[in-house]
Image (tube, rainbow, N blue to C red):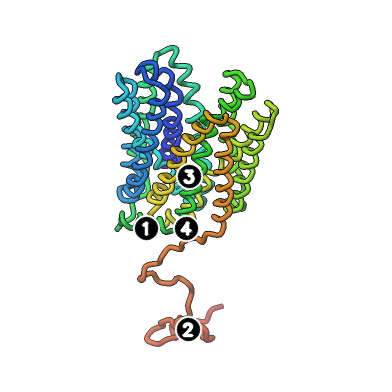
């Protein structure tokens, strides 16, 4: 594995850790700061909101400054933010830490841009993105398990501070990696014009839907399973199963033959995911409820990375040096889904029950099916060749021989030997 690939994998893994950390410590944090669930929810929103704003800035900055400095700053800020969160003694200080953590998360998220550029020669962004986001799933899966193990042994402050140290360590990796250089003549304003590209718009709307569904299911699947009288322990174990199913599907997507076009896979997996959510709503069997929850996670898995890969491919972002800008725009739109839809789902669950609240995710998933189908018909942007590029196609041209011109199409014998040379035997 190259150092550049290691930087990308580390960034996506750390992103998974960051997105799982607040959920892992929320009970202890609420106890220490003496805050209620509503204030804890605002900490989640602060992380997402600062990440949304940072995506619009960090994406173009990555294209302008390069991956190395952005990734290093992201690792450093993520570690520092957790140290601040470990030392927080008030709600306000915890809020500031979460705002900074959201910015750090987007810094390390350059791994989602760097990976498709350096893996598989930059020729298969969807496959590269699926491979990368296996690490995101591992980060999100392992964080609650590690935190639960350490909190009882080290206490809140030492555990969160230790995790901050773990997130800080990869800051040295970009120093030793040969990373792609930023494109010359980058125009930040030009990157904003990418919003007019249909692949960017569809990619952003697709991420809005996929992140919304992933956040909703990951946040409420335990409550859903408890409505079928699963114990807290079994519901928690099935939540881990949800993440494992999501990871496995990305392994399958990575191992799939390159001949299988992502544009065909996308509408199929989105449809199967929508069917799984619909079955979660209508089933009366506890066993089937657990099974459909796992299937929803499995079919959800490849959607985010495939949307990212297709957006980069359709815009030719890697070749044109705008990969950071494209990803920043679509990820910012995606985070909006992660903020809005889970909030709607929670409010609907209070009024009508958790099962009926999944109708929101079902509706979003049906929109995602449409988006996935439309993506197939979006044309790929071709790179503009500079005016001074010479066509390399062979052309018929006269060749110089001595002071005369010899047409290569004419049969001609050229005597290269001196007149007094002996005949060849």
Give the structural element (helix, strand or loop) at label 3. helix
Q: Which residue is mark 2?
A: 415
Q: Earlier in the sequence, mark 2 or mark 3?
A: 3
- Relative to 88, does residue 365 appear above or below in the rendering? below
Does the residue at mark 4 contact the one at mark 3 (Cβ under 8 Å)? Answer: no
Q: Earlier in the sequence, mark 4 or mark 3?
A: 4
The residues bearing labels 4 and 3 have C-alpha atoms spaced at a distance of: 15 Å
Q: How many marks?
A: 4
Q: Residues within 10 Å of mark 3 (few under 14, many from 20)?
A: many
The residues bearing labels 1 and 2 have C-alpha atoms spaced at a distance of: 63 Å
The x, y position of residue 264, in whole percent, is 61, 53
Outermost residue on the top side: it is 153
Give the structural element (helix, strand or loop) at label 4. helix
The residues bearing labels 4 and 1 have C-alpha atoms spaced at a distance of: 11 Å
Q: Which residue is mark 4?
A: 198
Q: Which residue is mark 1?
A: 193
Q: Residues within 10 Å of mark 2 (few under 14, many from 20)?
A: few
């Amino acid at each position: 594995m190259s150092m550049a690939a290691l930087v990308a994998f580390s960034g996506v893994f750390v992103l998974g850790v960051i997105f799982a950390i607040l959920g892992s410590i929320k009970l202890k944090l609420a106890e220490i700061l003496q805050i209620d669930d509503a204030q804890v929810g605002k900490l989640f929103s602060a992380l997402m909101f600062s990440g949304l704003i940072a995506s619009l800035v960090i994406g173009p900055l990555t294209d302008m400054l390069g991956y190395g400095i952005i990734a290093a700053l992201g690792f450093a800020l993520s570690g520092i933010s957790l140290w601040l969160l470990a030392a927080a003694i008030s709600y306000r200080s915890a809020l500031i830490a979460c705002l900074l953590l959201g910015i750090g998360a987007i810094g390390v998220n350059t791994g989602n841009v760097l990976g498709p550029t350096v893996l598989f020669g930059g020729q298969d962004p969807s496959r590269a993105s699926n491979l990368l986001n296996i690490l995101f799933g591992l980060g999100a899966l392992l964080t609650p398990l590690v935190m639960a193990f350490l909190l009882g042994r080290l206490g809140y402050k030492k555990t969160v501070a230790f995790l901050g140290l773990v997130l800080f360590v990869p800051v040295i990796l970009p120093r030793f990696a040969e990373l792609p250089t930023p494109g010359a003549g980058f125009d930040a304003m030009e990157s904003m014009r990418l919003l007019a590209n249909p692949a960017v718009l569809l990619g952003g709307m697709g991420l809005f839907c996929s992140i919304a569904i992933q956040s909703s299911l990951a946040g409420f699947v335990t409550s859903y399973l408890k409505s079928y009288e699963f114990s807290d322990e079994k519901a928690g174990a099935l939540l881990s199963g949800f993440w494992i199913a999501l990871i496995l599907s990305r392994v399958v997507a990575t191992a799939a033959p390159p001949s299988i076009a992502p544009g065909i896979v996308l509408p199929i997996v989105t449809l199967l995911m929508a069917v799984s959510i619909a079955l979660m709503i209508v089933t009366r069997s506890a066993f089937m409820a657990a099974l459909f929850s796992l299937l929803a996670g499995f079919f959800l898995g490849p959607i985010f990375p495939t949307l990212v890969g297709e957006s980069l491919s359709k815009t030719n972002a890697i070749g044109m040096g705008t990969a950071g800008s494209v990803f920043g725009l679509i990820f910012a739109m995606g985070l909006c889904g992660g903020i809005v839809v889970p909030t709607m789902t929670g409010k609907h669950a209070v009024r009508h029950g958790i099962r009926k609240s999944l109708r929101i995710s079902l509706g979003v998933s049906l929109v995602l099916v449409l988006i996935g189908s439309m993506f197939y018909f979006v044309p790929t942007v071709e790179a503009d060749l500079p005016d001074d590029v010479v066509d390399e196609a062979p052309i018929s041209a006269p060749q110089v021989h001595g002071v005369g011109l010899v047409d290569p199409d004419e049969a001609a014998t050229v005597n290269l030997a001196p007149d007094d040379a002996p005949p060849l035997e």
